[in-house]
């Protein structure tokens, strides 16, 4: 499990750790790790040109001391001082080692740029000249190494207001910050390398967590010798309408490839015909009225993809949400419960899988606000609605009170295409049917779906059905320890 923390949590932990150490110890540890990471990127340090962007706080101090270390190994180090002051001892150390102060023009001749403008001490959008320097660094040909966090990214949330550095690598001190795992911040951070400065014992419970492939492998149910199709878990899928048939096909496809013992599909004539043609494995009930009575026993339900939003959908929603079984609500199902939120008041587990627009309707918020602050809104929705929330999008997050939000580390922008969400609902539903709790089912499904998306895309556009096809390869990659 990868864990991450807010700026306040880091500051409090640093305070405790620093109390028992000589002044400057932590900054030296940070600088040593930073210099080593930069040397690794440069390959040959001697003779290379390193340009430091130095702000007025300790983030700039880290950069200056790391610059000193590289200068002692023969690098030509130049510091651009962005603030009205710079870390005094750090600057003196750099100058003693042969480094010098330069103007912004130095950026164009750099082999490597170190972004020490601001770290966890920033407030609000970058001011000038910081903002302009961040943009010049992004435009330069040299790779950028961000110190602790890319300047302009909010370390606690991943929010970006205005200009922000885009790094190839972010060398972060003591513990990973939440904003490095959540977009848009994650997209600016590049590869995140953690420098151990001894903070571990002082850290509280994490703010967020990200599953690794190994964690997913440990959580996934596996059939044993005594398994049969019923014991492995049966999923019921209520999706599709005579107007929208594809959503039913995709949701059933995702479910069939995610380990359910059996998938029961129930719907009207058109989607029934399509699902039957695509998936002979599914057990099908043709519904001539909105009733789950004749569908047979299941261990969990998926409700919503392509279902429509009229009386038919409302009646089915009332019936499945009235059972004591785990229910995943997606797509049109979310529109129905947004109109009547009392449907979500139930004791059994409920996993909702909205994108930002659907969550906006559910919690009466603005879509753009949700996209800018995904964590905050997913958490608030989980608390307000009393359900587990899987918020889809560039970074998918899973929130359930009172646990740390799970942030999904897999996925690709190629997934932003119609129907991929339907596949995800099938995968998560199948995991619910196999006995995983909503929190684990949601986060394992997001992980596997994101990985399947990467495998299916492989640098080219994908269709939603390709994601379902790539699911077995994603399960195998996780089991083999290669994901
Ligand atoms: N503490 C520790 O033990 C360790 C800390 N470590 C390191 O210290 C970093 C935190 O250092 P920090 O607290 O000095 O804050 P920091 O991120 O450098 O920036 C604050 C300065 O930026 C400025 N500024 C603020 N907002 C701004 C804006 N919008 N736009 C422009 N400027 C803005 C503001 O300056 P002013 O306005 O006062 O001129 C303020 O003084 C941390 O990320 C890690 O790298 C490591 O060495 C490990 C040990
Ligand atoms: N920019 C993006 N980067 C990564 N994944 C994305 C992005 N946009 C959407 N996705 C993923 O694609 C899927 C889209 O789901 P959804 O919005 O429900 O589409 P649909 O309703 O057409 O199936 C989700 O898994 C979501 O996380
Ligand atoms: K920085």
Image: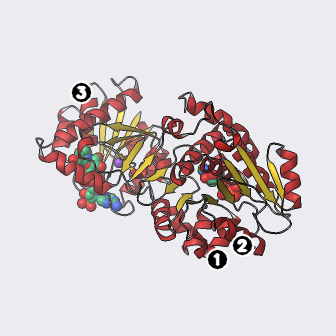
Q: Residue at 29% of width from left, 33% of height from top? A: 33
Q: Which residue is mark 1?
A: 339
- Secondary structure beneath disc 3? helix
Specify few, some or many for label 1: CA neighbours under 10 Å numbering under 14, 14-19, or 20 or more. few
Q: Is residue 281 left or right of residue 233?
A: right
Asked if one can make out residue 428 in the rendered structure from this viewpoint, the answer is yes
Q: Which mark is residue 314?
A: 2
Q: Which quarter of the figure has residue 240? A: bottom right
Q: Inspect this view and state whether residue 459 appears.
A: no
Residue 408, image x and y in percent? 52, 47
Q: Which mark is residue 72?
A: 3
Task: Judge left or right: residue 465 versus residue 120.
Answer: right
What residue do we see at 45% from left, 58% from top? Answer: 160
Question: What is the tally of numbered marks visible in this picture?
Answer: 3
With respect to residue 274, does 481 lie above or below?
Answer: above
| Mark 1 and mark 3: Cα distance apart in space | 66 Å
Residue at (80, 42) in percent of width and height:
281
Position of residue 423 measured from the top left corner of the image (x, y, whole percent) = 70, 49
The Cα–Cα distance between marks 2 and 3, rounded to whole angstroms, is 71 Å
Closest to the observer, 87 or 6: 6
């Amino acid at each position: 499990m990868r864990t991450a923390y807010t700026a306040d949590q880091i500051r409090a932990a640093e305070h405790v750790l620093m109390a028992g150490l000589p002044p400057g110890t932590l900054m030296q540890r940070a600088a040593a790790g930073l210099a080593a990471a930069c040397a690794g990127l440069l390959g040959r340090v001697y003779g290379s040109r390193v340009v430091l962007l130095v702000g007025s706080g300790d983030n700039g101090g880290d950069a200056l001391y790391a610059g000193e270390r590289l200068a002692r190994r023969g690098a030509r180090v130049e510091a651009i001082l962005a603030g009205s002051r710079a870390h005094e001892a750090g600057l003196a150390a750099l100058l003693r080692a042969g480094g010098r102060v330069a103007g912004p023009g130095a950026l164009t001749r750099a082999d490597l740029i170190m972004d020490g403008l601001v770290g966890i001490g920033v407030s609000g959008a970058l001011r000038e000249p910081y903002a302009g320097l961040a943009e010049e660094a992004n435009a330069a040909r040299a790779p950028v190494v961000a110190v602790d966090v890319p300047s302009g990214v909010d370390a606690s949330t991943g929010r970006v207001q205005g200009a922000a550095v885009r790094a190839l690598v972010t060398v972060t001190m003591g513990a990973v910050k939440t904003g490095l795992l959540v977009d848009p911040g994650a997209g600016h951070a590049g590869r995140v390398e953690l420098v151990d400065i001894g903070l571990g014992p002082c850290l509280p419970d994490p703010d967020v967590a990200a599953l690794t492939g190994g964690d997913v492998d440990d959580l996934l149910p596996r059939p044993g010798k005594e398994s049969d199709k019923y014991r492995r878990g049966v999923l019921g899928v209520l999706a599709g309408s005579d107007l929208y048939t594809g959503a039913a096909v995709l949701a059933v496809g995702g479910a069939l490839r995610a380990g359910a013992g059996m998938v029961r599909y129930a719907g009207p004539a058109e989607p029934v015909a399509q699902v039957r043609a695509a998936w002979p494995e599914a057990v099908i009930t043709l519904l001539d009225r909105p009733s789950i009575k004749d569908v047979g026993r299941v261990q969990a339900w998926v409700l919503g993809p392509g279902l429509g939003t009229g009386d038919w959908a409302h009646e089915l929603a009332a019936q499945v949400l009235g059972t004591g079984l785990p229910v995943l609500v997606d797509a049109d199902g979310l529109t129905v419960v947004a109109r009547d939120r009392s449907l979500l008041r139930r004791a059994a587990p409920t996993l909702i899988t909205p994108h930002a627009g659907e969550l906006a309707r559910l919690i009466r918020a603005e879509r753009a606000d949700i996209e800018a602050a995904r964590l905050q809104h997913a958490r608030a929705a989980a608390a307000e609605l009393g359900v587990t929330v899987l918020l889809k999008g560039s970074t998918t997050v899973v929130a359930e009170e009172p646990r740390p939000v799970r942030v999904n580390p897999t996925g690709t922008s190629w997934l932003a295409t119609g129907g991929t969400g339907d596949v995800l609902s099938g995968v998560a539903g199948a995991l619910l049917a196999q006995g995983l709790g909503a929190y684990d089912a949601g986060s394992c499904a997001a992980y596997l779906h994101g990985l399947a998306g990467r495998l299916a895309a492989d640098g080219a556009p994908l269709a939603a059905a390709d994601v379902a096809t790539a699911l077995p390869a994603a399960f195998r990659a996780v089991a083999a320890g290669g994901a």
